[in-house]
Image: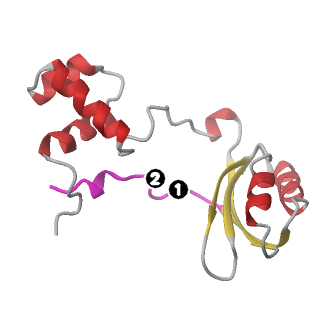
Amino acid sequence: MDPSPNLDDTDRRLLDIVLSDPRVGVREFSRRLGVARGTAQARLDKLEARGVLASWAPRLDPAALGYPLGALVHIQVAQARLDETCAGLAQVREVLEVVSIAGEFDVVCRVVARDHAHLEEVFSAIISTPGVLRTRTEVILRQRVGPRVTQLLGE
């Protein structure tokens, strides 16, 4: 089974270029792919419209911004308060992402902090969020594999 049935070889090569060198521009994309500039632009537009290319935003390093500590906070949420709780968590500046999960907990947040005392403040903000019943926290020691999706492009 083709792992990415809606992508042809040109789309895969284009995405590979975008991920490895997004600042080169459409003219360079077309040169590297060996296609007309209009073709490269049309492919990019289609990939964006389909949501395959979800963002052109740069990836920032929290540690370089002064937030070297990271943690995963698992949260048990009061029944029927998931949306309200997630909206409240989104108001905590140090909460980078929130995902709902199946299992003992309902939500996992990835958070950052400047130091241990600040991390304690972040935890206090999280546990005071309406709907939070219980938490379990794991401090991130080091990222071993970063966010990635290129392996899903297949050949």
SS at mark 1?
loop
On screen, residue 61 versus residue 80, left or right, reads left
Camera-nearest residue between 77 and 115: 77
Name the residue beneath numbered marker 1.
143
Q: Which colour scheme is used?
A: secondary structure
Looking at the rendered structure, the number of numbered marks drawn on it comes to 2
Where are the magenta residues, as a range? 140-155
Kindly report the distance in space between the C-alpha atoms of the residues bearing marks 2 and 1: 6 Å
**Mark drawn on residue 111:** none
* The quadrant where residue 64 appears: top right
Percent of width and height locating residue 70? 67, 54
Closer to the camera, 36 or 151?
36
**Residue density around tag 1, few if under 14, some if 14–19, many if 20 or more, within 10 Å:** few
Magenta span: chief secondary structure:
loop
> Quarter of the image containing the C terminus?
bottom left
Q: How crowded is mark 2: few (under 14 residues within 10 Å), some or many (20 or more)?
A: few
The kind of residue on which mark 2 rests is Gly
Report x, y in % for residue 102.
60, 77
Asked if residue 142 lies in the magenta stretch, the reply is yes
Quick check: 14 above or below 136? above
Locate residue 136, reporting x and y percent: 76, 73
Residue type (three-letter) at the residue carrying disc 1: Gln
Q: Which residue: 63% across, 81% down?
A: 103
Front disc: 2 or 1: 2
Find disc 2 in the rendering and name its residue: 146
**Quick check: marks 2 and 1 in contact, CB under 8 Å?**
yes
Compared with 99, 48 (above or below) is above
Question: Could you tell me which residue is drawn at 83 percent across and 58 percent down?
Answer: 126
Residue at x 36% of width, y 38% of height:
49
Asked whether 45 or 151 is in front, the reply is 45
In this rendering, is residue 9 above or below 143? Answer: above
